[in-house]
Amino acid sequence: MSLALLYGAAGSHPASWLHRGSRLAPPTDLAAYTNVARTAERGLFDLFFIADTPAARTDNLHAWSRFPLFMNVLEPVTLLTALAGATTRIGLGGTVSTSFSEPYNVARQFASLDHLSGGRAAWNVVTSANDYAARNFGHAKLAPHADRYRRAGEFVDVVRQLWDSWDDGAFVLDRDSGLYFDPTTQHPVHHQGTFFKVDGALNIARSPQGHPVIIAAGASDTGQDLAARTAEVVFSSNPSLDDAKRFTDGLKARMAKFGREPSELKVLAGLPIVLAETDAEAADDYARLQELVHPDVGRFRLGMDLETDLSDLPLDQPIPEDRIPKSANFHKGFFDDILRLIQDGKPTLRDVYLRYERGRKTITGGPKRIADLMEEWFAGGAADGFMLQFHIMPRGLDLFVDRVVPELQRRGLMRTAYAGATLRDHMGLQRPDRGARIPQPSE
């Protein structure tokens, strides 16, 4: 199975930073990132991953001050470049939005990271999902969901063409002939589309992986089509094994209409974990985390994904039906999860925010229980691996590497050493040929 780590400074739970078992370090502390990345590398993880949004929250600060989501974070490509020098094998992935970037800049950044890391770079393609980001770039609000995904599709196509600006081995550095590069090996991009016009070539050699690995998360129908056409790794957030298997099978079945094989895509199921020495200790830790969620945080965290203001509603009454939007424009998958919780009996607002998690429900347990669950999902075809999120960091990761990884190795479910040098090697993904055909949405 493939393993990725979604980094959280103190952990991934909204109250992680309040738990006495977590490390309270500034999210700008490079040493903290370095220590965690090296631990994940010691555990033979495929990928160290950084989520991001290009925005700070600018309203309701009384709530966000208790749940500082993306309020003091390093820019991902800069951070991953620093980590490239502090690690040797683990893949390095980060989020950059297609809604507020240009293809040339993104292609150049990730090609550079791939060179500096020796072939370990991965780009997470997102369209962004909050209006805070839109306002930073001259827009009152995000473009409609469908428009963002059309732009993202064209964006990825242009980036992939730019990564193929040169043949492999184009820069010959031949003193005898006086040629620094072979002029026949450049392939400029001449693109004019709905969203972008690009006419030129990257000023960097084709990278070690040919293309850095492309990551996506596809919950909506539109997002799944984009992932089936362009992605090599997809993050899923399904709550049950059966749901996850349906998602994985359905997504891989979509690939055929784009001329792709299922083996070209790895699905990593989100796995939020509270891990302790025993099942009982882990359950106690999670109960304590839930107790630490402030009501303001609960309301605003729920309202953020339900795309409505819940700040004036009483905690111990159901959310009125007329306060629930008809559809989502940000995260459709999260929006639908909340609707299911609201429709399950007559829960109060407090009930809903305590039960709601952004994706898969938290798993608590000791090392054997966690290993058993991972084996069940992997063997059942629900996923090709996992995107691990530890609610208490770095303790959860340390215990996972020391106790769960050896158990997975004993069961033959995990490598005992890195077999290659690149992220594509780790995940069994083919290195793309230069100039390979890019399937189009109309096909």
Image (cartoon, helix red, strand yellow):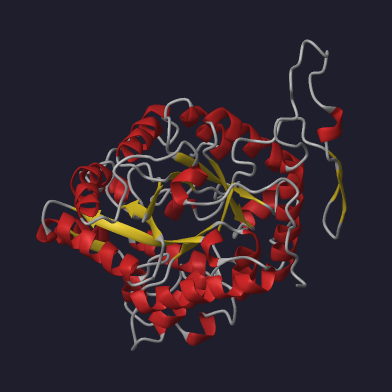
Residue 168 visible in image: yes
Outermost residue toward the top in this view = 176
User: Residue 182: image x %, image y %?
Assistant: 82, 27
Q: Position of residue 85 (x, y in %)?
A: 47, 25
User: What's the residue at 82%, 57% (across, down)?
Assistant: 195
Q: Extreme front residue here?
A: 176
The quadrant in which the N terminus is found is: bottom left
Taking the spot 39% from the left edge, 80% from the top edge, the residue there is: 341
Residue in the foreground of this view, choosing between 329 and 190: 190
Q: Is residue 289 left or right of residue 58?
A: left
* Position of 298 relative to 48 (above/below): below
Question: Which of the two residues, 294 or 225, is positioned nearer the viewer here?
Answer: 225
Locate residue 373 relative to residue 387 in the image: left or right.
Answer: left
Residue 201 location, quadrant: top right
Image quadrant holding the C terminus, namely bottom right
Please state which of residues 320 and 109 is positioned toward the viewer in this rendering. Answer: 109
Q: How many marks?
A: 0
Task: Determine whether, in the image, residue 389 is placed left or right of residue 429.
Answer: left
Q: Is residue 3 above or below residue 337?
A: above
Residue 346 placed where, x, y %? 34, 87
Residue at x 67% of width, y 68% of height: 259
Camera sees residue 292: no
253 relative to 279 in the view: left or right = right
